[in-house]
Image: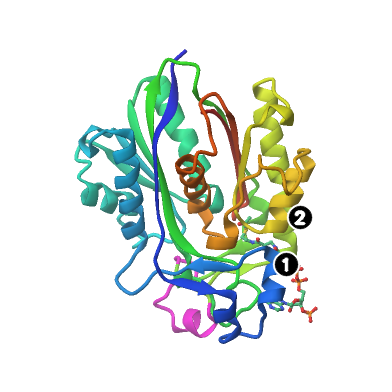
Amino acid sequence: MVRSRITGTGSCLPDKILTNLDLERIIDTSDEWITSRTGIKERRIAEEGQFTSTFAAEASRRALEMAGIKAEELDLIILGTVTPDFPFPATACIVQHEIGAVNAAAFDLSAACSGFIYGLSIADKYIRTGDAKKVLVIGAEVLSRVVDWTDRNTCILFGDGSGAAVLEVTEGDSGILSTHIFSNGSFWNTLYQPGCGNRNPATNEQTLLDRLCYIRMEGNDVFKHAVRAMEEAACTALTANGMTPADVSLLIPHQANRRIIDATAKRLGIAADDARLFVNLHNYGNTSSASIPISIDEANRTGRMKSGDNVLLAAFGGGFTYGSALIRW
Ligand code: ACO
């Protein structure tokens, strides 16, 4: 059967680390509060001169190197982000230029924290239909530039970085078994950036005075929906492949918040301390669309996934969007 397979992974994070103790110095918070409510200890922050494309291009180079293919061989580049370098052109086009993928079509995709799963789903369809043979899927964010550093409810959560994966056509048993994507637009304004689009343009002085160009979030609503939606998405993937949670070798959930991750895993019968649950958000915070590909790369490079393992991905984010993918590694 023709399917797509991840043949290379890469990630790139800023060197600059912002710890909870650093945050204690700029807002009214504590390491104890942040750790107990979120599980986050530190996050990476882009420095001047570093952009979403900077991290995306480097993550892509690393993924291409592992796959052992040249950028010219890529047919398609899909980049999930809510923090593009510019409103247009697509950051994917900038990455295309930087890595020299001269034969690829390139576009951005806006599905917030589900961006990588959405991208994986499209890439998988292109490969299965025969319209592409080699696709690069990227999740990349510089959220630190849309975080309100005076809002302690949100600024503690987010971080910057990028992860990427090369997908190639395969006829073997391993590869992407299925992908599943969902949206619920009735919650579009529960987690969003009200300003700097065309409803509240940055050219309107009031937009800036009202601090509309920063992330706004109803944290408790997001929490409840995230757990339910990630469970639903994960179960859909398992059912579609005739599997149960016992068949899962590694669960890689979107790294939003330790309590969301643990609650989702628990609903799937996977304990918080089970080695089958992948968690790295203590180091990076929530990097939105980048969180799953960074995690896949880390799991891959540290030997957490063996040939034949069933790897389950589940994400949830603004929109609301959510989704899952089941991969036989
Ligand atoms: N430091 C100290 N106190 C704080 C902080 C902070 N950083 N932030 C909020 N508080 C205070 C609040 O002001 C409130 O004080 P009050 O009782 O005097 O009013 C108190 O702590 C409790 O606030 P809650 O909002 O009820 O805290 P909660 O336990 O719900 O945790 C949190 C808040 C962490 C945001 C939680 O709702 C959550 O995790 N939501 C999910 C949001 C999320 O992960 N979003 C990521 C993007 S979406 C995604 O990626 C899936």
Would residue 285 be visible to someone looking at this image? no
Q: Which of the four quarters of the rendered structure image does ligand 1 lie in?
A: bottom right
Mark 2 Cα within 10 Å, few/some/many (few <14, many 20+)?
few
Count of numbered tags? 2
Seen from the viewer's position, the closer of residues 109 and 143 is: 143
Mark 1 Cα within 10 Å, few/some/many (few <14, many 20+)?
few
Which residue is drawn at the image coordinates 24% and 39% (left, top)?
71
The question of residue 194 being in magenta is answered with: no
Label 2 is placed on what type of residue?
Lys
Q: Position of residue 159 (x, y in %)?
A: 50, 65
Seen from the viewer's position, the closer of residues 90 and 277 is: 277
Task: Please tell me whether the stretch drawn in magenta is mainly helix, strand or loop.
Answer: loop
* Residue 204: quadrant of the picture: bottom left
Which residue is drawn at the image coordinates 30% and 52% (left, top)?
57
Which residue is drawn at the image coordinates 59% and 49% (left, top)?
254
Residue range corresponding to the magenta coloring: 197-211
Residue at disc 1, CB closer than 8 Å to ligand 1: yes
User: Which residue matches tag 2?
Assistant: 224
Q: Position of residue 271 (x, y in %)?
A: 76, 44
Disc 1 is placed on an element classified as helix
Q: CA distance from mark 2 to mark 1?
A: 14 Å
Would residue 4 be visible to someone looking at this image? yes
Is 208 drawn above or below residue 315 in the view shown? below
Is 90 drawn above or below residue 231 in the view shown? below
Furthest toward the front, the residue is 303
User: Which residue matches tag 1?
Assistant: 37
* Residue 308: quadrant of the picture: top right
Q: Position of residue 114 (x, y in %)?
A: 55, 47
Label 1 is placed on what type of residue?
Arg
Is 88 drawn above or below residue 107 in the view shown? below
Seen from the viewer's position, the closer of residues 247 and 135 is: 247
